[in-house]
Amino acid sequence: ANSPLHDRNLGKRAVEQFMEQEAQLTLPDFSDTEQTFKHLEDSDLLRINLLFKLMGNTGLTNVLSGVGAWAVRNGMPLAEWGVKKTIFQQFVGGTSLIMAQPAIKNLHKYGVTSILDFGAEAKNSEQDYNNFMKEVLGAIEFSAEAPAAIAVVVKITGLAPDEMLENLNGATVDFGGDDHAQFQATLRRLDAICGQAAKRDVQVYIDAEESWMQNTIDQLANKMMARYNQERVIVLNTYQLYRHDRLDFLMQSHERARREGYLLGAKLVRGAYMLKERARAEEKGYPSPIQPTLEATHNAFNTAVRFCADNVNTIACCIGSHNEDSVRLMTELIVERKIPRNHPHVQFAQLLGMSDNLTFNLAGGGYNVSKYMVYGPVKEVLPYLIRRAEENGSVTGELGRERKLIKQEIKRRKDIEK
């Protein structure tokens, strides 16, 4: 009777201990190159290795962003072809959603879903805004029918003029007023997108922009979340944690959602406009909104990850990160908090063509993980491609790490053949 086998509490503890050990053993190994690159043929690995080697040359990157961009915009012979065969092939799914379907299907074979991102940059006419809305509505329909795609991305700058977003940034927007026709038109477009997404059970990720228009975007995002996130999370706002005020804003957003009775959708990113933000703050003489150090950004991001894990029932989060430490942190929190790894409120995402070691090892471990599937005509996605080239060619170490893993996998495959 005194045997440990008859001690129910001891038995329960042993089971819990076993479960915890099992979970620890199955944490993803982000250095597993076989899992990372199993979706790529040998020829793909060699091509990407060469491309990343070229991108590591800042001189070539500068040529792409200068002469190359000018040549594509002005329709110079072979310029578009050259971009399509190199950097476009790596970071963009296709020139249209139809052309991106093979890439979407290939990812899904390996457990990776797609977040559809039409790569249109800021526009400046009503026709452009309506065309962008129609493109996103088409992507919602595609996602609703295809399990391989789960969400669409909305850039508010694709639906509204920058100038209006900037002019309204310092104010609390009057959503009921008819005094600003342009804003009301923007609201109608965004509501059409989010309403259709809610009907079709597809998520909408609202992109972040520069601080001088972000407050207007946050108000639009909050309005859509209050309307469509009543029972499940349809709309997610984006929080750029390289801004020193965004961690507090995330917590305030959660408090507001709880108070007003809806679920919060939060995509966490570090951020994309640091140099521009600092330069403008200096030029106009106001304090920079950017964190004082890289370490402060990391701390804020990881605190935000913990906050989302602690409130997993009322926040649906997407960890939009290429930072291995932050991604690993969430996998560890999932174990600690006993959150199912496929919980609908925990999503990971990386950009197509980058950080496959995170994406495919998460997928192999049964986590919810997606690629941002950017698509669109070469001219439209060119600014996006230039940013990818500049980021990867910078001194962040991203490119060096990617190439190191590719070389390891090439060597591993050669050793098997011997």
Image: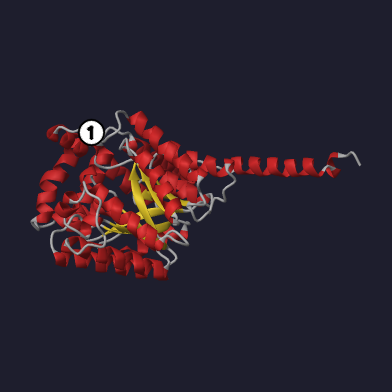
Question: In front here: 185 or 91?
Answer: 185
Residue found at x 13% / y 50%: 69
Q: Which residue is mark 1?
A: 288
Residue 52 figure quarter: top left
- In this rendering, is residue 37 above or below 174? above
Tell me if 38 is positioned left or right of 374 in this view: right
Residue found at x 18% / y 49%: 166
Residue found at x 19% / y 41%: 61
Residue 11 figure quarter: top right
What amino acid type is highlighted by mark number 1? Ser
User: Where residue 89 appears, x then y in whole percent?
Assistant: 28, 54
Residue 379 in sight: yes
Residue 204 in sight: no
Residue 178 figure quarter: bottom left
Question: In front here: 78 or 347?
Answer: 347
User: Where residue 338 appears, x then y in whole percent?
Assistant: 60, 46
Residue found at x 33% / y 34%: 397
- In this rendering, is residue 199 above or below 82? below
User: Where residue 39 appears, x then y in whole percent?
Assistant: 43, 54
Q: Secondary structure at mark 1?
A: loop
Question: In front here: 314 or 374?
Answer: 314
User: Where residue 48 appears, x then y in whole percent?
Assistant: 32, 47
Tally of numbered discs? 1
- Where the N terminus falls, by quadrant? top right
Color scheme of the displayed model: secondary structure
